[in-house]
Amino acid sequence: MVVAIAIIKMKDLFAVVMLTGIYGLLSASFFVAMDAVDVAFTEASVGAGISTLLMLIVISMTGRREKTTRHKPFPALLIVAITGGLLIYGTLDMPYFGSVDAPSHSHIAARYINDSMQEVGVPNIVTSVLASYRAFDTFGEVIVIFTAGIGVLALLSVTHRPEDNDKFSTINDSMHEQHLVVRIVAKMLIPFILLFALYVQFHGDFGPGGGFQAGVIFAAAIILYAMLFGLNTARKVINQTFIQLIAATGVLIYASVGVASLLSGGNFFDYNVLSNDPIAGQHLGILIIEWGVGCTVCSVIIIIFFNFAGRREIQQNNGSKYDTNQDLQ
Amino acid sequence: MLMGLFNDWVVIMLMMIGLYIVIAHGNLIKKIVGLTLFQTSVFIFYISIANVEGGTAPILADDITLYSNPLPHVLILTAIVVGIATTALALSLVVRIKEAYGTIEEEEIQRQDNQTPEVKKEGKQS
């Protein structure tokens, strides 16, 4: 709350972005306090990690100063006050915080809590709802993420220019050799981060975790590598075309589970028919689609990062060329 | 007695701060930060709906009878990841605007548009 007000005041975008990161972390800890462990997991990795990083890359391209605003703030303040007042008036009819008999707990949630163990056989209710009861919904969200990845690719993708790349790698190397301690520590940490991501991926049935979180953590490890060892080194490790293929394969895996259950005589995403035992079928279905989700999320985030960072390199390259030209003149 | 609604009011405050940033600030990155604030306030709203007094995290165990509502958790979990993907899309649009106009201040973009009406360029209005 205080952080949010500070965000309005700051003119320096760098500080704003840092405050956004703090805000993400705070809301993640709020989610833990509210017993939403899966959500907190996601928010901590996304809100405090990836989004801060992306915004930092963008302000490094667009400049960190905000112009003094010349809008008149009073009409805006008036609109905001009126909307806020109406919303607060609306809350007077809301059920009180934490009450057990609130309308939101009285419809389908009871079935999820009471019957999901018999029907799906997965202790983590969030996972069973996400991947089994509402699999169709989750499928849609995965496609949205995939589409956003394609969008970023279409807007920012850069054609490779090998002669420039060589020049850059030397600049990068000289820059990165300065951070020896950071590089060695990161080199030790990255395998563990990757391992942890896989653990989160496959342990999502029993504890907090799942494809979305695992994808983000896996991508974070690779982004860390790319930041410390230079983009070109990271490109050698992870081929751009390959990662795009993985993103598409993730969606395909997800959809093919649905088609497989159709072909076996059930409904779309009806995992019971995937195996002789319905519970085993559910387990299999959830495992496969979580894998698909993880693949897509991870590779889309890597694609987004690589494209932003690649764009920035090109811009810097052009900038330095202009500088040298001006010097010559 | 009205303290039971306190969480809703905090959410509304956050939401209005986000809305104010979107309306009153001209800088496109600031606007995106405002949208993120707005988005997170909705997340907090859903999660606080899901909370049950005395309940615990929705992972089934033998000796626990009262759980939080898992459904809002699922919705928000996916919404967060979709949110970062769409934010990335918005940021990439900002990068392209910067390349086309040389600025990310909304008013300067509009001024440049007015100066060259024959050149059709699309300024992004969030």
Image (cartoon, coloured by chain):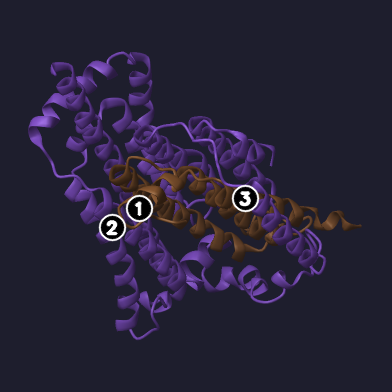
Label 1 vs label 2: CA separation? 28 Å
Circle 2 crowding by C-alpha within 10 Å: few under 14, some 14–19, many from 20: some
- Disc 3 chain ID: B
Residue that numbered label 1 is attached to: B113
Contact between marks 1 and 2 (CB within 8 A): the answer is: no
Residue B48 in the figure: left or right of residue B87:
right
The disc at residue B20 is 3
Labels 3, 1: front one:
1
Residue that numbered label 2 is attached to: A150
Relative image position of residue A23 (x, y in whole percent): 59, 40
Q: Say which of A196 and A240 sits in front.
A: A240
- Disc 2 chain ID: A
Question: What secondary structure is marked by label 1?
Answer: helix
- At a point 51% along the width and 48% down the height, the residue shown is B31
Question: What secondary structure is marked by label 3?
Answer: helix
- Disc 1 chain ID: B
Q: Residue furthest bottom?
A: A265
Relative image position of residue A61 (x, y in whole percent): 34, 35
Q: Are the residues under badges 1 and 2 in a single subunit?
A: no
Q: Which chain is brown?
A: B
Residue B101 in the figure: left or right of residue B90:
left
Residue A256 in the figure: left or right of residue A75:
left
Labels 1, 2: front one:
1
Whether residue A301 is visible here, answered yes or no, is no
Q: Amino acid at mark 3?
A: Tyr
Rendered colour, chain A:
purple
Vertical comparison of A41 with B60: above or below = above
Relative image position of residue B108 (x, y in whole percent): 41, 44
Vertical comparison of A104 with A77: above or below = below
Q: Say which of A159 and A31 sits in front.
A: A159
Q: Quadrant of residue B118?
A: bottom left
- At a point 58% along the width and 68% down the height, the residue shown is A117
